[in-house]
Amino acid sequence: MENKTERFEKLLVKNGLKRTAPRLQVLEILSGRDSATSQPYLEQVMGKDADRVTLYRVLQAFEEKGIIHKVLDQQGTANYAICSDGCSAHEHHDEHVHFNCDNCHKIYCLDSVKIPALKVPTGFKVEHLNLIATGLCANCSDKVN
Amino acid sequence: MENKTERFEKLLVKNGLKRTAPRLQVLEILSGRDSATSQPYLEQVMGKDADRVTLYRVLQAFEEKGIIHKVLDQQGTANYAICSDGCSAHEHHDEHVHFNCDNCHKIYCLDSVKIPALKVPTGFKVEHLNLIATGLCANCSDKVN
DNA sequence: CTATATTTGCAACATAATTGCATTAACATG
DNA sequence: CATGTTAATGCAATTATGTTGCAAATATAG
Ligand SMILES: [Mn+2]
Ligand SMILES: [Mn+2]
Ligand SMILES: [Zn+2]
Ligand SMILES: [Zn+2]
Protein backbone atom coordinates (compact mmCIF):
# COMPACT_ATOMS: atom_id res chain seq x y z
CA MET A 1 0.00 0.00 0.00
CA GLU A 2 1.18 3.40 -1.05
CA ASN A 3 1.95 5.56 1.96
CA LYS A 4 0.13 8.76 2.72
CA THR A 5 2.95 11.19 2.11
CA GLU A 6 3.58 9.69 -1.31
CA ARG A 7 -0.07 10.17 -2.18
CA PHE A 8 0.07 13.80 -1.09
CA GLU A 9 3.19 14.44 -3.10
CA LYS A 10 1.55 13.02 -6.21
CA LEU A 11 -1.50 15.15 -5.56
CA LEU A 12 0.63 18.29 -5.44
CA VAL A 13 2.57 17.42 -8.57
CA LYS A 14 -0.61 16.57 -10.45
CA ASN A 15 -1.85 20.08 -9.70
CA GLY A 16 1.36 21.82 -10.66
CA LEU A 17 2.24 22.71 -7.09
CA LYS A 18 5.67 22.26 -5.60
CA ARG A 19 6.21 19.73 -2.86
CA THR A 20 6.80 21.97 0.14
CA ALA A 21 6.68 21.38 3.87
CA PRO A 22 3.75 23.68 4.69
CA ARG A 23 1.62 22.14 1.96
CA LEU A 24 2.34 18.59 3.04
CA GLN A 25 1.66 19.53 6.64
CA VAL A 26 -1.74 21.01 5.81
CA LEU A 27 -2.71 17.89 3.85
CA GLU A 28 -1.48 15.75 6.73
CA ILE A 29 -3.58 17.61 9.29
CA LEU A 30 -6.74 17.80 7.20
CA SER A 31 -6.61 14.13 6.23
CA GLY A 32 -6.29 13.05 9.83
CA ARG A 33 -9.59 14.57 10.88
CA ASP A 34 -13.15 13.34 10.53
CA SER A 35 -14.63 16.81 10.16
CA ALA A 36 -13.79 20.12 8.56
CA THR A 37 -10.92 22.06 10.12
CA SER A 38 -11.03 25.73 10.96
CA GLN A 39 -8.39 28.22 9.89
CA PRO A 40 -7.68 29.21 13.52
CA TYR A 41 -7.16 25.57 14.46
CA LEU A 42 -4.79 25.04 11.55
CA GLU A 43 -2.89 28.16 12.46
CA GLN A 44 -2.52 27.01 16.04
CA VAL A 45 -1.44 23.47 15.16
CA MET A 46 1.09 24.61 12.59
CA GLY A 47 2.49 27.07 15.09
CA LYS A 48 5.83 28.42 13.97
CA ASP A 49 6.26 25.71 11.36
CA ALA A 50 4.81 28.13 8.85
CA ASP A 51 3.93 31.77 8.71
CA ARG A 52 0.24 32.74 8.95
CA VAL A 53 0.42 34.21 5.48
CA THR A 54 1.81 31.02 4.06
CA LEU A 55 -1.08 29.10 5.55
CA TYR A 56 -3.56 31.44 3.89
CA ARG A 57 -1.79 31.04 0.58
CA VAL A 58 -1.63 27.27 0.85
CA LEU A 59 -5.36 27.11 1.60
CA GLN A 60 -6.15 29.43 -1.28
CA ALA A 61 -4.06 27.43 -3.74
CA PHE A 62 -5.62 24.14 -2.61
CA GLU A 63 -9.10 25.56 -2.96
CA GLU A 64 -8.40 26.84 -6.46
CA LYS A 65 -7.07 23.47 -7.53
CA GLY A 66 -10.05 21.59 -6.17
CA ILE A 67 -8.04 19.82 -3.47
CA ILE A 68 -9.99 21.23 -0.56
CA HIS A 69 -13.23 23.14 -0.16
CA LYS A 70 -14.17 25.91 2.22
CA VAL A 71 -17.23 25.90 4.48
CA LEU A 72 -18.19 28.86 6.59
CA ASP A 73 -19.69 27.98 9.94
CA GLN A 74 -22.50 29.89 11.63
CA GLN A 75 -20.04 32.47 12.96
CA GLY A 76 -18.53 33.00 9.53
CA THR A 77 -15.29 31.22 10.39
CA ALA A 78 -13.59 29.50 7.48
CA ASN A 79 -13.35 25.72 7.72
CA TYR A 80 -11.67 23.42 5.25
CA ALA A 81 -12.15 19.83 4.21
CA ILE A 82 -10.49 17.66 1.61
CA CYS A 83 -12.61 17.26 -1.48
CA SER A 84 -13.88 13.89 -2.49
CA ASP A 85 -13.01 12.77 -5.98
CA GLY A 86 -14.30 14.69 -8.90
CA CYS A 87 -13.25 18.18 -7.94
CA SER A 88 -10.74 19.99 -10.10
CA ALA A 89 -9.37 23.43 -10.76
CA HIS A 90 -12.30 24.11 -13.00
CA GLU A 91 -15.15 22.74 -11.00
CA HIS A 92 -15.99 21.81 -7.49
CA HIS A 93 -18.50 19.04 -6.83
CA ASP A 94 -19.11 19.48 -3.15
CA GLU A 95 -22.83 19.95 -3.17
CA HIS A 96 -23.37 17.86 -0.08
CA VAL A 97 -24.90 18.99 3.18
CA HIS A 98 -22.69 20.42 5.90
CA PHE A 99 -23.68 19.64 9.42
CA ASN A 100 -22.64 22.12 12.09
CA CYS A 101 -22.88 20.65 15.60
CA ASP A 102 -24.10 23.15 18.19
CA ASN A 103 -22.31 21.30 20.95
CA CYS A 104 -18.83 20.31 19.73
CA HIS A 105 -18.89 22.83 16.86
CA LYS A 106 -17.50 20.29 14.43
CA ILE A 107 -18.56 20.59 10.82
CA TYR A 108 -19.26 17.33 9.08
CA CYS A 109 -19.38 16.86 5.33
CA LEU A 110 -22.40 14.62 4.82
CA ASP A 111 -21.33 13.32 1.44
CA SER A 112 -24.18 10.86 1.34
CA VAL A 113 -26.89 13.48 1.74
CA LYS A 114 -27.77 15.15 -1.52
CA ILE A 115 -29.39 18.55 -1.58
CA PRO A 116 -32.89 18.31 -3.03
CA ALA A 117 -33.70 20.37 -6.10
CA LEU A 118 -35.39 23.67 -5.50
CA LYS A 119 -38.25 25.62 -7.01
CA VAL A 120 -37.32 29.29 -7.10
CA PRO A 121 -39.30 32.28 -8.36
CA THR A 122 -39.38 33.01 -12.08
CA GLY A 123 -36.24 34.63 -13.39
CA PHE A 124 -33.86 33.33 -10.76
CA LYS A 125 -31.23 30.96 -12.11
CA VAL A 126 -29.76 28.70 -9.45
CA GLU A 127 -26.13 27.80 -10.01
CA HIS A 128 -25.10 26.26 -6.69
CA LEU A 129 -26.78 25.21 -3.48
CA ASN A 130 -25.16 25.43 -0.11
CA LEU A 131 -27.05 23.79 2.73
CA ILE A 132 -25.89 24.00 6.31
CA ALA A 133 -27.76 22.05 8.94
CA THR A 134 -27.25 22.77 12.62
CA GLY A 135 -28.10 20.59 15.57
CA LEU A 136 -26.39 17.74 17.39
CA CYS A 137 -23.98 15.37 15.73
CA ALA A 138 -24.11 11.62 16.34
CA ASN A 139 -21.41 11.75 19.01
CA CYS A 140 -22.93 14.61 20.95
CA SER A 141 -26.52 13.38 20.85
CA ASP A 142 -25.24 10.06 22.23
CA LYS A 143 -23.56 11.75 25.16
CA VAL A 144 -26.53 13.96 25.98
CA ASN A 145 -28.92 10.99 26.21
CA MET B 1 -52.32 55.25 6.49
CA GLU B 2 -49.90 55.17 9.38
CA ASN B 3 -46.55 56.58 8.42
CA LYS B 4 -43.38 54.54 8.39
CA THR B 5 -41.61 56.27 11.25
CA GLU B 6 -44.61 55.77 13.51
CA ARG B 7 -44.59 52.08 12.71
CA PHE B 8 -40.91 51.85 13.55
CA GLU B 9 -41.39 53.69 16.82
CA LYS B 10 -44.15 51.31 17.83
CA LEU B 11 -41.94 48.36 16.87
CA LEU B 12 -39.18 49.62 19.15
CA VAL B 13 -41.52 50.28 22.07
CA LYS B 14 -43.16 46.88 21.65
CA ASN B 15 -39.73 45.31 22.07
CA GLY B 16 -38.74 47.40 25.07
CA LEU B 17 -36.20 49.40 23.10
CA LYS B 18 -35.89 53.14 23.36
CA ARG B 19 -36.74 55.31 20.36
CA THR B 20 -33.27 56.52 19.35
CA ALA B 21 -31.92 58.05 16.18
CA PRO B 22 -29.49 55.26 15.22
CA ARG B 23 -32.18 52.61 15.65
CA LEU B 24 -34.72 54.47 13.57
CA GLN B 25 -32.12 55.09 10.91
CA VAL B 26 -31.22 51.42 10.64
CA LEU B 27 -34.89 50.48 10.30
CA GLU B 28 -35.32 53.18 7.69
CA ILE B 29 -32.41 51.92 5.61
CA LEU B 30 -33.28 48.24 5.84
CA SER B 31 -36.94 48.79 5.02
CA GLY B 32 -36.09 50.75 1.91
CA ARG B 33 -34.26 47.90 0.25
CA ASP B 34 -35.48 44.86 -1.61
CA SER B 35 -32.63 42.64 -0.49
CA ALA B 36 -30.52 42.01 2.59
CA THR B 37 -28.09 44.75 3.55
CA SER B 38 -24.48 44.19 4.49
CA GLN B 39 -22.88 45.54 7.63
CA PRO B 40 -20.20 47.41 5.61
CA TYR B 41 -22.89 49.07 3.52
CA LEU B 42 -24.83 50.12 6.61
CA GLU B 43 -21.68 51.46 8.18
CA GLN B 44 -20.91 53.48 5.09
CA VAL B 45 -24.40 54.90 4.69
CA MET B 46 -24.72 55.85 8.34
CA GLY B 47 -21.36 57.56 8.16
CA LYS B 48 -20.77 59.74 11.16
CA ASP B 49 -24.42 59.71 12.15
CA ALA B 50 -23.57 56.90 14.50
CA ASP B 51 -20.47 55.24 15.83
CA ARG B 52 -19.46 51.85 14.40
CA VAL B 53 -19.94 50.28 17.80
CA THR B 54 -23.44 51.65 18.08
CA LEU B 55 -24.34 50.11 14.75
CA TYR B 56 -23.09 46.72 15.91
CA ARG B 57 -25.11 47.05 19.09
CA VAL B 58 -28.26 48.13 17.29
CA LEU B 59 -27.99 45.17 14.94
CA GLN B 60 -27.38 42.81 17.82
CA ALA B 61 -30.37 44.12 19.77
CA PHE B 62 -32.64 43.90 16.72
CA GLU B 63 -31.55 40.37 16.02
CA GLU B 64 -32.18 39.29 19.61
CA LYS B 65 -35.66 40.79 19.54
CA GLY B 66 -36.57 39.10 16.29
CA ILE B 67 -36.78 42.35 14.35
CA ILE B 68 -34.08 41.46 11.83
CA HIS B 69 -32.17 38.33 10.91
CA LYS B 70 -28.59 37.85 9.87
CA VAL B 71 -27.44 36.04 6.75
CA LEU B 72 -23.80 35.38 5.96
CA ASP B 73 -22.95 35.60 2.30
CA GLN B 74 -20.43 33.40 0.51
CA GLN B 75 -17.56 35.58 1.71
CA GLY B 76 -18.73 35.42 5.32
CA THR B 77 -19.94 39.01 5.35
CA ALA B 78 -22.88 39.71 7.65
CA ASN B 79 -26.05 40.83 5.91
CA TYR B 80 -29.29 41.84 7.58
CA ALA B 81 -32.93 41.78 6.57
CA ILE B 82 -36.11 42.67 8.36
CA CYS B 83 -37.96 39.62 9.60
CA SER B 84 -41.37 38.81 8.30
CA ASP B 85 -44.07 38.45 10.90
CA GLY B 86 -43.84 35.68 13.39
CA CYS B 87 -40.32 36.26 14.67
CA SER B 88 -39.85 37.23 18.29
CA ALA B 89 -37.22 37.46 20.97
CA HIS B 90 -37.71 33.79 21.69
CA GLU B 91 -37.86 32.34 18.23
CA HIS B 92 -36.91 33.20 14.72
CA HIS B 93 -38.93 31.82 11.83
CA ASP B 94 -36.69 32.66 8.94
CA GLU B 95 -36.18 29.23 7.47
CA HIS B 96 -36.55 30.44 3.94
CA VAL B 97 -33.98 30.18 1.19
CA HIS B 98 -31.46 32.95 0.69
CA PHE B 99 -30.44 33.69 -2.83
CA ASN B 100 -27.01 35.17 -3.37
CA CYS B 101 -26.61 36.71 -6.82
CA ASP B 102 -23.17 36.13 -8.33
CA ASN B 103 -23.50 39.25 -10.45
CA CYS B 104 -24.96 42.04 -8.31
CA HIS B 105 -24.11 40.29 -5.03
CA LYS B 106 -27.51 41.07 -3.59
CA ILE B 107 -28.97 38.59 -1.14
CA TYR B 108 -32.68 37.97 -1.54
CA CYS B 109 -34.87 36.42 1.11
CA LEU B 110 -37.04 34.00 -0.84
CA ASP B 111 -39.81 33.84 1.73
CA SER B 112 -41.99 31.78 -0.55
CA VAL B 113 -39.45 29.00 -0.96
CA LYS B 114 -39.48 26.57 1.91
CA ILE B 115 -36.48 24.42 2.67
CA PRO B 116 -37.33 20.78 2.03
CA ALA B 117 -36.95 18.30 4.88
CA LEU B 118 -33.75 16.34 4.96
CA LYS B 119 -32.69 12.76 5.63
CA VAL B 120 -29.49 12.76 7.66
CA PRO B 121 -27.41 9.81 8.90
CA THR B 122 -28.47 7.99 12.07
CA GLY B 123 -27.69 9.86 15.25
CA PHE B 124 -27.63 13.35 13.79
CA LYS B 125 -30.38 15.60 15.13
CA VAL B 126 -31.17 18.53 12.84
CA GLU B 127 -32.26 21.69 14.62
CA HIS B 128 -32.11 24.33 11.89
CA LEU B 129 -31.53 24.42 8.17
CA ASN B 130 -29.81 27.21 6.36
CA LEU B 131 -29.91 27.08 2.59
CA ILE B 132 -28.07 29.53 0.41
CA ALA B 133 -28.53 29.36 -3.32
CA THR B 134 -26.15 31.16 -5.64
CA GLY B 135 -26.64 32.10 -9.27
CA LEU B 136 -28.30 34.95 -11.12
CA CYS B 137 -31.19 36.91 -9.72
CA ALA B 138 -34.19 37.86 -11.85
CA ASN B 139 -32.81 41.32 -12.61
CA CYS B 140 -29.37 40.14 -13.61
CA SER B 141 -30.49 37.18 -15.71
CA ASP B 142 -32.74 39.57 -17.60
CA LYS B 143 -29.88 41.89 -18.40
CA VAL B 144 -27.55 39.10 -19.49
CA ASN B 145 -30.04 37.71 -22.02
C1' DC C 1 -39.03 68.31 36.15
C1' DT C 2 -36.12 64.92 37.79
C1' DA C 3 -34.26 60.37 38.81
C1' DT C 4 -32.86 56.21 36.71
C1' DA C 5 -31.82 52.89 33.51
C1' DT C 6 -30.56 52.61 28.74
C1' DT C 7 -27.97 53.89 25.09
C1' DT C 8 -24.26 56.01 22.97
C1' DG C 9 -19.35 57.42 21.85
C1' DC C 10 -14.66 56.82 22.39
C1' DA C 11 -10.46 54.35 23.06
C1' DA C 12 -8.36 50.17 23.17
C1' DC C 13 -8.06 45.58 21.85
C1' DA C 14 -8.60 41.11 19.26
C1' DT C 15 -8.65 38.42 15.26
C1' DA C 16 -9.02 37.40 10.26
C1' DA C 17 -7.36 38.41 5.98
C1' DT C 18 -4.51 40.86 2.31
C1' DT C 19 -0.50 43.09 0.00
C1' DG C 20 4.30 44.22 -1.30
C1' DC C 21 8.75 42.92 -1.30
C1' DA C 22 13.07 40.66 -0.32
C1' DT C 23 14.81 36.04 0.53
C1' DT C 24 14.73 31.16 0.03
C1' DA C 25 14.04 26.81 -1.91
C1' DA C 26 12.08 23.48 -5.45
C1' DC C 27 13.11 21.35 -9.49
C1' DA C 28 13.88 21.38 -14.68
C1' DT C 29 17.58 21.54 -17.61
C1' DG C 30 21.71 20.59 -19.07
C1' DC D 1 25.20 16.89 -9.84
C1' DA D 2 25.62 21.87 -10.42
C1' DT D 3 22.92 25.87 -11.46
C1' DG D 4 19.43 29.16 -13.28
C1' DT D 5 14.62 30.14 -13.22
C1' DT D 6 10.38 30.31 -11.13
C1' DA D 7 7.51 29.43 -7.45
C1' DA D 8 6.92 29.71 -2.63
C1' DT D 9 7.89 31.49 1.80
C1' DG D 10 8.67 34.92 5.63
C1' DC D 11 8.24 39.34 7.41
C1' DA D 12 6.33 43.87 8.04
C1' DA D 13 2.66 46.69 7.35
C1' DT D 14 -2.11 47.47 6.50
C1' DT D 15 -7.18 46.80 6.23
C1' DA D 16 -11.49 45.01 7.85
C1' DT D 17 -14.57 43.08 11.13
C1' DG D 18 -16.03 42.61 15.57
C1' DT D 19 -15.66 43.11 20.88
C1' DT D 20 -15.08 45.23 25.58
C1' DG D 21 -14.90 48.69 29.36
C1' DC D 22 -16.16 52.87 30.87
C1' DA D 23 -17.68 57.64 31.14
C1' DA D 24 -21.03 60.85 29.20
C1' DA D 25 -25.44 61.66 27.20
C1' DT D 26 -30.36 60.96 26.73
C1' DA D 27 -34.96 58.67 26.59
C1' DT D 28 -38.66 58.17 29.34
C1' DA D 29 -41.33 56.73 33.62
C1' DG D 30 -43.24 58.79 37.49
MN1 LIG E 1 -17.84 19.41 2.52
MN1 LIG F 1 -34.03 36.11 5.11
ZN1 LIG G 1 -21.01 17.38 18.13
ZN1 LIG H 1 -28.30 40.12 -9.34
Image: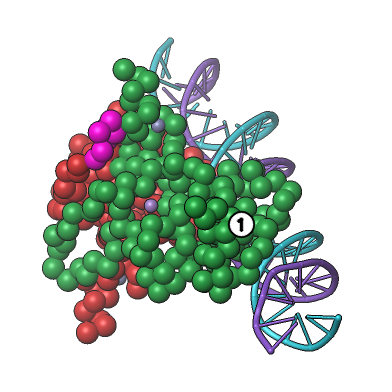
Chain colours: A red, B green, C cyan, D purple
Q: Residue at x 18, y 54 (%)?
A: B116
Q: Nearer the viewer, residue A5 or B135?
A: B135
Q: Residue at x 17, y 58 (%)?
A: B117
Is residue A9 at least partly visible in the picture? no
Quadrant occupied by the C terminus of chain A: bottom left
The chain letter for the residue carrying disc 1 is B
Q: Nearer the viewer, residue B43 or B30?
A: B30
Q: Residue at x 34, y 58 (%)?
A: B94
Is residue A123 at least partly visible in the picture? yes
Task: Assign a secondary structure to mark 1.
Answer: helix
Q: Residue at x 45, y 54 (%)?
A: B82
Q: Which residue is mark 1?
A: B24
Which amino acid, by three-letter code, is at mark 1? Leu
Residue A44 falls within the magenta-colored stretch: no
Left or right: residue D11 compared with residue A95 = right
Image quadrant in which you'd find residue B57: bottom right
Magenta-drawn segment: A120-127
How would you rate the neighbour count of disc 1 (Cα within 10 Å): few for under 14, some for 14-19, many for 20 or more? some
Asked whether mark 1 lies closer than 8 Å to ligand 2, one says: no
